[in-house]
Image (spheres, grey):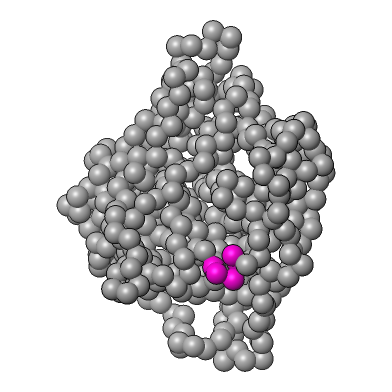
């Protein structure tokens, strides 16, 4: 975990600091932490068909979100937030034993009137590797949850050790909790981390790497006065007509980047590669640099693009990733803000994400490149589709009067109607009738957006 020696009792110059009020929290006082790389317990040995094996334990831990905050209780993979970054070569299978050593009591309020929470342990976990081509029994089904020491398990629970084949293009994935009814709480509590697949085709491109390749996880959070995590609740017990204890929407009022509030990053005047993830529950961001510098987009959720795209800003929806190169060589000695121009809903401080402080010299000559061509692109021919389907996102009300989301007028518990044939192509039309954006990704497969 990240613990600085300066804390709550040594903030004389910030006597007015109030963790509930973002306008009183000083920005750019903490350096951006870089998540540690997960180390396998057993190394890969192709001659013996030996796979990489990891053990990652979910624990309650203490974390300092800001130099002048007290320690905050979180849930973390290996007790850290973000969790350790898993880096793996393409097509090299790994196995991960995810251990639940979390306490029985959650650090955030549980709404026991929600689907999946009525007769289950308050603290349950199951891990979904977001964006992975993976077998269903290692995909992290919301009902494949398990409690501490696997004392209780969900009805879809199948295996203790997950297997990831990594049989896909190099890409920025992320792993996070996926337990039914409490995913939002567990991810907000800290259960999220990067998973990077390295592709040998990518290595030949000479992109910025090592210390010049940095993952950035963005989340919005709100804090109580004592610095603990806040999530809205109402303690009315489940009765015939309760006041809902979980609002339909919740936006935090601060920006947390790699576990720190509005951090800064000292960079050299050279090219850097940033893999940016929006790990917020609901908030989307429109990001760009304060000096208007061009961003060179080289990848998306599913890996590298065919060619770089020069952009000034971009929208990042929840769970979405973007892969960028930023060239700081023209800005020696300057400070540049990664800013957010999306103000929905507006909140003081949400217009900035973090600061880059550009140094005056480089440690080594910058030989990295931004190639004209990145990866071969083989578009899917829509004419080869064997079937077209329409998925309509709609809503109704539950018996408490709360919004209930439906897909083709069906609920989660209804039988599956989309039964596809292996190795075929289909066209899916996703229709959103909600009054707000609703990002969607499809598990177990890659897909191409047609429009």
Residue nearest the viewer, comparing 295 with 367: 367
Indicate whether 386 appears above or below 316.
below
Residue 125, percent from left and from top:
32, 52
Residue 104, percent from left and from top:
24, 40
Looking at the figure, which quarter contains the C terminus?
A: bottom right
Residue nearest the viewer, comparing 389 with 320: 320
Residue sitting at 71 percent across and 49 percent down? 366
Residue sitting at 37 percent across and 57 percent down? 127
As drawn, is 427 to the left or to the right of 87?
right
Look at the image and tell me whether residue 213 can be seen. Answer: yes
Q: Residue furthest left?
A: 151
Looking at the figure, which quarter contains the N terminus?
A: top left
Residue 213, percent from left and from top:
60, 50
Residue sitting at 80 percent across and 38 percent down? 331
Look at the image and tell me whether residue 398 can be seen. Answer: no
Residue nearest the viewer, comparing 34 with 99: 34
Indicate whether 139 appears above or below 253.
below
Instruction: Indicate yes or no whether the magenta region holds residue 119.
Output: no
Q: Give the range drawn in magenta.
A: 199-203
Residue sitting at 26 percent across and 49 percent down? 100
Quadrant in the picture for residue 154: bottom left
As drawn, is 284 to the left or to the right of 259?
right
* Majority SS type along the magenta span: helix
Indicate whether 333 appears above or below 9.
below
Q: Which residue lies furthest to the front in this view?
A: 364
Residue 195, percent from left and from top:
47, 57
Indicate whether 197 appears above or below 257.
below
């Amino acid at each position: 975990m990240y613990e600085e020696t300066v804390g709550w009792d040594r903030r004389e110059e910030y006597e007015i600091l109030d963790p509930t009020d973002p306008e009183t929290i000083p920005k750019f006082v903490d350096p951006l932490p870089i998540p540690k790389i997960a180390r396998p317990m057993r190394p890969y040995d192709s001659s013996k068909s030996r796979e990489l094996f990891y053990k990652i334990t979910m624990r309650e831990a203490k974390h300092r979100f800001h130099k002048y905050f007290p320690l905050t209780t979180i849930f973390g993979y290996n007790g850290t937030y973000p969790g350790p970054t898993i880096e793996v070569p393409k097509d090299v299978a790994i196995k991960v034993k995810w251990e639940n050593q979390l306490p029985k009591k959650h650090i955030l309020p549980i709404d026991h009137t929600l689907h999946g929470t009525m007769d289950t342990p308050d603290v349950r976990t199951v891990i979904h590797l977001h964006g992975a081509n993976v077998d269903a029994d290692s995909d992290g089904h919301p009902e494949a949850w398990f409690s501490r020491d696997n004392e209780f398990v969900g009805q879809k629970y199948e295996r203790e050790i997950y297997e990831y084949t990594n049989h896909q293009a190099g890409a920025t994935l992320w792993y996070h909790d996926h337990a039914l009814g409490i995913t939002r709480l567990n991810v907000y509590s800290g259960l999220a981390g990067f998973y990077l697949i390295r592709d040998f085709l990518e290595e030949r491109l000479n992109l910025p790497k090592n210390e010049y390749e940095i993952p950035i996880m963005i989340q919005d959070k709100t804090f109580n006065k004592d610095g603990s995590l806040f999530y809205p609740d109402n303690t009315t017990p489940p009765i015939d007509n309760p006041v809902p204890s979980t609002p339909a929407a919740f936006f935090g009022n601060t920006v947390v980047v790699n576990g720190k509030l509005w951090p800064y990053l000292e960079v050299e005047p050279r090219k850097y590669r940033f893999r940016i993830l929006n790990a917020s529950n609901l908030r989307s961001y429109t990001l760009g640099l304060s000096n208007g510098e061009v961003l060179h987009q080289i990848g998306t959720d599913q890996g590298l693009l065919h060619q770089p795209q020069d952009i000034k800003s971009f929208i990042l929806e929840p769970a979405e990733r973007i892969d960028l190169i930023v060239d700081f060589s023209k800005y020696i000695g300057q400070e540049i803000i990664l800013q957010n121009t999306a103000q929905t809903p507006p909140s003081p401080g949400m217009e900035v994400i973090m600061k880059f402080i550009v140094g005056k010299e480089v440690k080594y000559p910058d030989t990295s490149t931004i190639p004209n061509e990145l990866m071969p692109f083989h578009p899917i021919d829509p004419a080869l589709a064997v079937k077209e389907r329409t998925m309509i996102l709609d809503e109704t009300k539950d018996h408490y009067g709360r919004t209930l989301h439906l897909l083709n007028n069906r609920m989660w518990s209804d039988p599956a109607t989309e039964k596809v044939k292996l190795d075929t192509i289909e066209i899916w039309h996703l229709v959103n009738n909600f009054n707000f954006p609703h990002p969607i990704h499809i598990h177990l497969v890659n897909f191409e957006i047609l429009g």
